[in-house]
Amino acid sequence: MTAERFEVSPLLEATHIEKSYGATHVLKGTNFRLRRGEIHALLGGNGAGKSTLIRIVTGLAAADAGRIQLRSVREDGKPPVIAVVHQELALLPELTVAENIGIAHATSAFSLARRGHTRSIAAEALRLIDPALAERILDIPARTLSLHEGQVVEIARALSIGAEILLLDEPTANLTAGETEKLFSLLRRLAREKAIGIVFVSHRMKEIRALCDTCSILRDGRTVVDAAPMTELADADIVAHMGQPAHRAAVSRKRVTGSGDQKGALRLDGPAATRLDIQPGTILGLAGAPSGPSALIAMLVGARTSSPWRLSGDGIAAPFRSPREAIRAGVGFVPGDRAGKGVLSKLPILDNVVAARRVRDGRGFVRRGERDECSSLVAALQLKAGSIWDLPGSLSGGNQQKLLVARWLDLPLRMVVLEEPTRGVDIGTKRDIYALIRRMAEAGAIIVWWSTENVELLELCDAIFAFDTDGTPKGFLAGERFDEDGLAELTGMAA
C-alpha cells in the first residue's frame, strides 16, 4: 500500500481528547486521525486508553474535553457512518444471515416481516464481498456460520448502512491463519476500492505488518506516535513507545527444563519434539495466539482426549478421559469464560465454592462443615457477598472471578490451569488474584497461566512458554530475553 491515495483532509480527526472516570484520568489529550482508504493500526498496552477512545469516537461515551471531527463525501452532508467489528460476534444466532443484515435497516418491529426487501438488502451487501458466499449463506441461521463467515456478515451489514469507517477490535483472535488471510484480503480490497477508512486494533505484530499502512500508539492516555507510516517503525520501536516494563528485578525463577525425576515434577511432551519438565511450585506462563495455548489447556483439563500433547508424572498419565478424571488426578481449572463455562449461575455461592471438592469426592450433597469452610474462604478472599446462599449474580465481575479461584484453594493439587483469569477485572482484584495464585504455588501446585497480557506474564511467571500466531510451539523465554522484546520476537505479537 502507498500513501498517495490518501486524502490530505482526515476522514476522522480526534484532537486533545480527555476523559476521566471518577479520580481516574484515562485520556489526557489524546490525538488520532484516520484518512480515507487507510488501514491504521491503533496500538497501546492494556490501560493505555484504546477502548475509551473507541467508545468516544463511536458515540458510546462523551469526552470531557477535546474535539471530534468527521468528514464525509456523502451528498446528503451527514457525517460518515462508523461500524465496529469485535472479536466476539454481535449476531443474533437464531436469525438468518439476511435478517441479521436487514435488522440494521429496521424502522419498526414489523420491518423484518418484509422478507423480500430484507433479503434484497442483504444479498446486495454480501455480493460486494463474495457473490458465491452470498448465495450459500443468505438464508441459513447465523449460528451455523464459521467465525470468518460471521465477520464477513458483520462487515456486509456495515457496508449496507453505508459505513465509511470500520473499527476492528482484535478481529483475528479466534481465526485460523487461513481465515485471517481471507479477512485481510477483504479489508485491503475495501480500503482500495471503496476508500473505507479502517482502524485495526491488535497485539499481533506479524498481522499489523501484513495489513496496516499507518500506526498510532497510545501510552498512559497520551498519543506517543501519531499516524506514523509503518515503514518508519521497527518492532522494537513499537514496544518501546508502548512503554512496557521489564520483568521483576529480584525474582528467583524456578527451572522448568530440569530433571523430570524430581518428586512431584510433571512432564509435558508435545509437537515438534517439545518437552517440558516442570517442578512443583512453578508458575508457567503460556503466551501467544489462542490456538496454541487452548489446545494444550484442553488436554490438561480433560476437555480433549485426542491431542498431540501428553502429560506424565508420578501417578499421572494424560490425556484424561474427562474433566472429572482430571480433577481427581489433582488438576484444577479456572476457565476464561466465567459466564459460560465457570460460574454456576443458578446455584448459590456455597455450591460454587465447593463444586471442585464435590466432583473430586464424587458426591452431590452438602457435607457437614461445608458451610463453615465456604464462609471461611469467602471471608479470606474478602468477597463482598451478603450471604453464601446468594446467587453469584449478586457479585461483581471481579468477585465472581475470585470465586472461581477459591474453588481450588487448600486442595491437594498437582496443577492448576488458568485461562485469562484477570480479564475484565480492575487492578485491585488483579492483585488479589495474583496473591491467591502465588499461595497455590507456594503450597506446591504447578500453575499453568495463559494470558494475552504480556506484562502480566512477565510480572507473575517463573518461566514463559511461547506459541506463534499459527499456534506452533516456539520455546521458552529465558535469560536476558525475559522481557517484552523477547516475547514479541517469539510470539510475533506485541503486548
Image (cartoon, grey):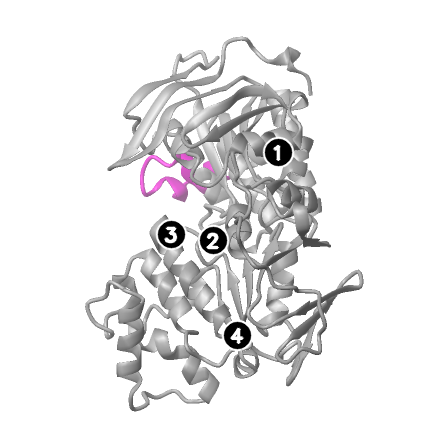
Is 402 in front, or is 397?
A: 402
Image location of residue 273, percent across then percent down:
80, 63
Q: Is residue 127 left or right of residue 434?
A: right
What residue is pinned by disc 2? 93
Name the mark nearer the viewer: 3 or 2.
Answer: 3
Mark 3, residue position: 425
Instruction: Pick out the residue farthest to the left.
Output: 386
At 55% from the left and 23% from the top, the residue drawn is: 196
Secondary structure state at the residue bearing disc 4: loop
Amino acid type of the residue tagged 2 in the rendering: Pro
Are the residues tagged 1 and 3 within 8 Å (C-beta)?
no
Q: Is residue 141 visible?
A: no
Residue 241 tag number: none
Q: Are marks 4 and 2 in contact (CB under 8 Å)?
A: no
Q: Secondary structure at mark 3?
A: loop
Q: Quadrant of the C terminus?
A: top right
Label 4 vs 2, first from the N-terminus:
2
How far, Cα to Cα, is label 3 from label 2?
28 Å
Q: Is residue 449 above or below residue 76?
A: below
Amino acid residing under circle 1: Arg
Cα distance, mark 1 to mark 3?
41 Å
Say what amino acid the circle numbered 3 marks.
Val
Magenta segment? 103-119
- The image shows residue 36, relative to residue 430, as above or below, that is above
The local secondary structure at tag 2 comes to loop
Q: Is residue 384 left or right of residue 460?
A: left
Label 3 environment density (alpha carbons within 10 Å; few <14, some 14–19, many ≥20): some
Q: Earlier in the sequence, mark 1 or mark 4?
A: 1
Disc 1 secondary structure class: helix
Q: Which residue is mark 1?
A: 127
